[in-house]
Amino acid sequence: MFLTLAEELHFARTAQRLHLSAAAVSQTISRLERRFGAPLFTRTTRRVELTPLGQQLLDDLRPAHAQIQAAIARATASGHGIAGQLDIGYMSAAAAQRVLPLVDAFCELTPGYQVRIRETALADLYGPLRRAEVDLSLLPLPVDEPDLAVGPVLLSEAAMLAVAVDHPLAGHTCATSADLADQTVLFAQNLPTYWIDHHLSVPEGSATVTPRSLTLPGSKRSLPTSPQATAWPSSAHRPNSSTHARA
Amino acid sequence: MAIVGAQTELLYPRPGLICVPIAGPATFDYALVWCTDRLSAAAAAFLRHVTS
């Protein structure tokens, strides 16, 4: 229950996921906090947040939880005659369109593997890998992390500048790095500096990088992510962000 | 403004938003990434598959 609440940071959603009442969730968390002698969460009428103690507990529990989940998955797979389970992450719908046929072909050629696919948020590019939630992830380069290995490039797409239709650059046939100077460019929070520098090839100091979530014109939703996720579909065309299964 | 991949315009069309090509060779390249100390047999098999 603690892990679910730490993920949702919302009592009602936690209760819904666990098929419990919000009161039951609240009481159990309170009992935990009495046991630890300090609060795990701060609660206001508007938000729930982890305390430093709660964050420490979460960091300590996550690897063990991931190991337990993986062990259960392996045992389940073996019990059902499945040779192995593979969890693949992807970042952006373009990457999903590349991964899905690869997975289909892999499963066809090597039956017995169960492959699960899940979307990765740009604001947490490497988290699912480090938390052992996925085995592989199709991610935008550059990736320059000492604990991560990078395979060959599987997908390339041109970079575009997304602007409002009434923006002065909207009428341009193409934008140059000079056009980006003195502009404010939105990037997701938590992206490595080298990643932003790579994609923002303008003279140093001439553009303002604003890490923040994006709210798009005509939408009431706020995107917690990224250059790759500055928009979402008005139709049902978007690959589902929930877990896809291929077996 | 934000820098996005070209397929954003196709996959996520939004009224009020337009994508302008960026001059030059700017691209978003994607590669499979894994933890150096943890590559399962299944993941290794998938890597072999995509690189073969």
Image (cartoon, coloured by chain):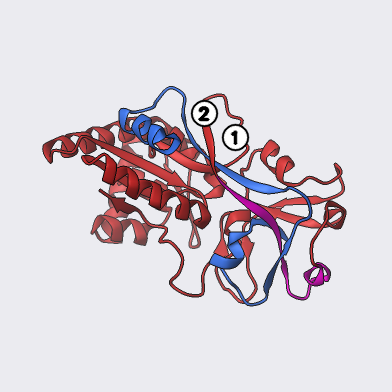
Chain colours: A red, B blue
| Residue A1 position within the rendered picture, expressed as x and y whole percent measured from the top left | 30, 47
Residue A13 screen position, x and y as percent: 36, 60
Task: Write the residue at 83% across / 46% down.
Answer: A202
The answer to whether the residues at label 2 and label 1 have Cβ atoms under 8 Å apart is yes
Local crowd size for mark 2, using a 10 Å CA cut-off: few (<14), some (14–19), many (≥20): some
Residue for badge 1: A143
Q: Which mark is residue A198?
A: none
Q: Position of residue A84 (x, y in %)?
A: 24, 35
Horizontally, residue A179 falls left or right of residue A103, namely right
Residue A148: numbered disc: 2
Of residue A88 and residue A57, the one placed in the foreground of this image is A88
* Residue B40: quarter of image: top left
Say if the magenta span includes residue A163. yes
Query: Is residue A213 visible to us here?
Result: yes
User: Sequence-wise, which precedes: disc 2 or disc 1?
Assistant: 1
Q: Nearer the viewer, residue B50 or A63?
A: B50
Q: Which residues are magenta?
A: A155-172
Label 2 marks a residue whose chain is A
Q: Is residue A56 magenta?
A: no
Dot 2 falls on a residue whose secondary structure is strand
Q: Residue at x 17, y 34 (%)?
A: A75
| x, y percent for residue A241 | 42, 58
Q: Amino acid at mark 1?
A: Val
Q: Amino acid at mark 2?
A: Leu
